[in-house]
Image (spheres, helix red, strand yellow):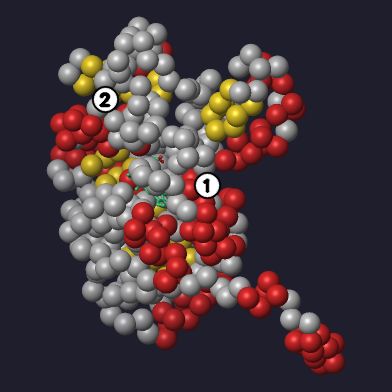
Amino acid sequence: MRYPILGVIVFASCFPMPELAAQKKVDFVKEVLPIFMKRCSECHGAEEQEGDLRLDIKASVFSEEHSDPIILAGKPDRSMLYRRIVLDKDDPDIMPAEGDPLSKRQIATIKRWIKEGADWPDAASAKVEPEKSPQPVEVAVPDIDDAGKAALAALRKRGATAVRVSARSNAVYVNFSLLAKGAKDADVRAMRGLEPQLVWLNLGRTAITDEGVAELARYKELRRLHLEKTAVTDGALAHLAGLEHLEYLNVYGTAVSDRGIGALAPLKGLQKLYVWQSKVTAKGAAVLKKQLPQLVVDRGDYVAAIRKVTAEQKAAAPVNDMCPMMPKRKAVLTAVFVYEGERIAFCCEKCLARFAKSPDKFLPKLRRKKPGKTVKDTVNETCPFVDKPIKPGVVAVYKGKRIGFCCFNCRDKFAANPQKFAKVLEKFGLK
Ligand code: HEC
């Protein structure tokens, strides 16, 4: 088998291919990170984390909390970050959200970096101040021993993300959610050896069941745990009662109920509990909050509020056209918040939720519309394919009309062959 390989090498060196020879791999630290720091970090850094995104921390960019991947290695076109920087300069969703667009050269560098695998050295992340970050990056844990190293290797081989949360810490982050339903109860056992270091675990959208969660009782350092969109039930939460450091738990979209969250009462450090689209009621959340006063239970109440407004949206127009949180972006009627008698509209639920947390801080940013002013709009507010609100930046233009979608999958499905979706087009009078 040696001969043919040698043949290839000889061939390559006799006829150097100019493109390959000239282009050195993009150096993330020297070429890409400076763009993020200069043009993005003001809104996606230590001070502000717009869209829950920090572009100075690797784990934030590759976190599974984003519904569409921010960066998908090898695929710029499937990477939210790339798609948002190449939008038309007048597009309200373009990033950076203020100032000039990135230069052609900067865009090309980022594109090539993603294509080449989006290599982001672990050491190249901001050093996070503990009090500013909700992420458990500064936890002091012992060095990773041989059993732990073997576990990291096994997890990576399995296709999970298994990394240190920051350059300064041995604390470890493991993410199975990329494997989706391919990750099963048995896979959780591969983490054995990382008991002293595992602080952050994402099992969201996997095939984990209560039985797999039972295994987690041994990971006493866990700070953050994602179990959203899984088959876990009330029984699973009983296994977490001994995780005394747990700060964040996400059981959104599961069958967990009031009875199940009752088991969390001993977790004095629990700060955030996500129970949107579960069976947890407002009453159940209130009972738990009596025992854990610092706890914020997110039931997605603001989403219910939005639905209610949609039903009565004809009653009154909002006072603004543009989102107060994103001045370049139009506000939509599916995200309206009434504050001191004014109906204030936002571009998305995320902005609404941020505003609702501290209205007085953001009220000065509100620009009330002048009478008679019209805005360029999408023809719809709910995705044509799925019953979900449309998302900023996810738009297809067809026959001069802007149609919004809830995700790029839906958008691309439509854009690839608009004619095929006659029914959809009919809905918007575009047939
Ligand atoms: C002036 C503030 C500002 C600047 C500067 C800025 N952004 Fe943003 N960005 C936002 C806001 C606000 C959001 C959340 C709302 C949204 O998704 O549009 C956001 C959202 C995003 C998202 C989507 C996150 C998600 O989870 O959906 C990406 C990707 C992004 N920005 C990339 C960038 C990049 C890359 C840069 C620099 C080239 C940048 N942004 C600069 C304000 C900013």
Q: Quadrant of residue 21?
A: bottom right
Residue 373 image position (x, y, % from top left): 37, 15
Residue 227 image position (x, y, % from top left): 42, 51
- How far separated are the C-alphas under marks 2 and 1? 27 Å
Residue 83 image position (x, y, % from top left): 53, 47
What residue is rendered at 21% in x and 34% in y?
A: 362
Q: Nearer the viewer, residue 393 or 293?
A: 393
The N terminus sits in image quarter: bottom right
Q: Tell me which amino acid carries mark 2.
A: Arg
Could you tell whether 180 is left or right of 240 in the image? Answer: right
Does dot 2 land on a helix, a strand or a loop? loop
Q: Residues within 10 Å of mark 2 (few under 14, many from 20)?
A: some
* Residue annotated with mark 1: 86
Mark yes or no: residue 195 visible.
Answer: no
Mark yes or no: residue 141 visible.
Answer: yes
Q: Is residue 93 above or below residue 179?
A: above
The C terminus sits in image quarter: top right
Q: Residues within 10 Å of mark 1 (few under 14, many from 20)?
A: some
Q: Tell me which amino acid carries mark 1.
A: Val
Does dot 1 land on a helix, a strand or a loop? loop
Q: Nearer the viewer, residue 227 or 422?
A: 422
Q: Total marks drawn?
A: 2
Check if mark 2's residue and mark 1's residue have beta carbons within 8 Å: no
What residue is rendered at 52% in x and 42% in y?
A: 87
Could you tell whether 269 is left or right of 239 in the image? Answer: left
What residue is rendered at 39% in x and 8% in y?
A: 314
Could you tell whether 183 is left or right of 40 in the image? Answer: right
What residue is rendered at 35% in x and 43% in y?
A: 98
* Residue annotated with mark 2: 367
Q: Quadrant of residue 368?
A: top left
Q: Is residue 411 above or below residue 192?
A: above
